Image (tube, rainbow, N blue to C red):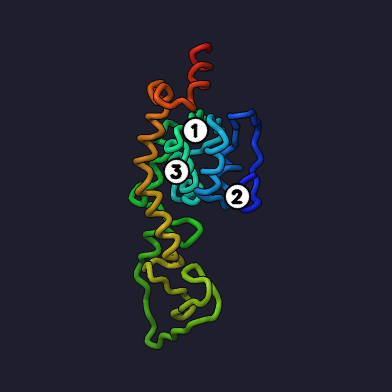
Amino acid sequence: PLPFGRSMVARRVSKRAVWLDFEEAFCRPLGPGDYVSLASRFDVFFLSGVPVLSLKTHNEANRFLKFIDTVYDSACAVVIQAEAEPAELLRMVDEAEGGQSLTGYGEALKESQQTFSVPKEVIMSVRKEGGSSSSSSTTFIGDTEWSSTGLVGVSLAALSAVRDVTFSKERAVSRLTEMRCAAFLVNRPRGAVLLQALEEV
């Protein structure tokens, strides 16, 4: 069980270890408090099915990065089955990498910044309905939603989330690399059981 009555389905659970799938742990609306709760209960995490992440999955990437920060700060041990090495796993989680767009929130970045021909008579209206830039009211220029980000259909919240992920990824790569070393487990008693098991393999 997680805070506020939420729950998570694990593939396997023992007294101090848990095996989670990426989809179950990061493709749902979970937050730092959920990961703190897990880290307080389990010493060792097995995580499977981690894909190469990008801005197309920036929400999932953001949750994954928060999880890594949480288990690192809690001195837990983590075994991850992923599609790539840490640097490649998160390389595309970057606004500047490959001219990516904020998929799901608007057109591609370069398309969002294209020059529009503005008619002589422009009708601006405020509708009492939420859009990608607001939850209560939305400003339209003609039939096009206006966003204070300057990007068509991209809200400030979405842009902020992407910036957070871009900023956090280097720290996550460093921590994932460090957590692969035996020295990391040696200096963290919670990982002693895993280290002993690895030495016996």
Residue 137 spot, x, y in % from top left: 51, 77
- Drawn side of residue 3 relative to residue 172, left or right: right
Question: Alpha carbon of mark 2 to alpha carbon of mark 3: how far?
Answer: 19 Å
Camera-side mark, 3 or 1: 3
Q: Residue at x 42, y 58 (%)?
A: 108
Q: Residue at x 56, y 33 (%)?
A: 42
Residue 22 spot, x, y in % from top left: 56, 39
Is residue 98 at least partly visible in the picture? no
Q: Residues within 10 Å of mark 3 (few under 14, many from 20)?
A: many
Q: Amino acid at mark 1?
A: Glu
Q: Amino acid at mark 2?
A: Pro
Please state which of residues 142 and 6 is positioned toward the viewer in this rendering. 6
Question: Alpha carbon of mark 1 to alpha carbon of mark 2: how far?
Answer: 30 Å
Q: Residue at x 48, y 61 (%)?
A: 105
Q: Mark 3 sits on what residue? A: 65
Q: Mark 1 sits on what residue? A: 83
Question: Alpha carbon of mark 3 to alpha carbon of mark 1: how far?
Answer: 16 Å
Q: Mark 2 sits on what residue? A: 3
Please state which of residues 186 and 150 is positioned toward the viewer in this rendering. 186
Secondary structure under tag 1 reads loop
Q: Earlier in the sequence, mark 1 or mark 2?
A: 2
Q: Residue at x 37, y 67 (%)?
A: 149
Camera-side mark, 1 or 2: 2
Task: Determine whether label 1 and label 2 are within 8 Å by CB.
Answer: no
Q: Residues within 10 Å of mark 1 (few under 14, many from 20)?
A: some
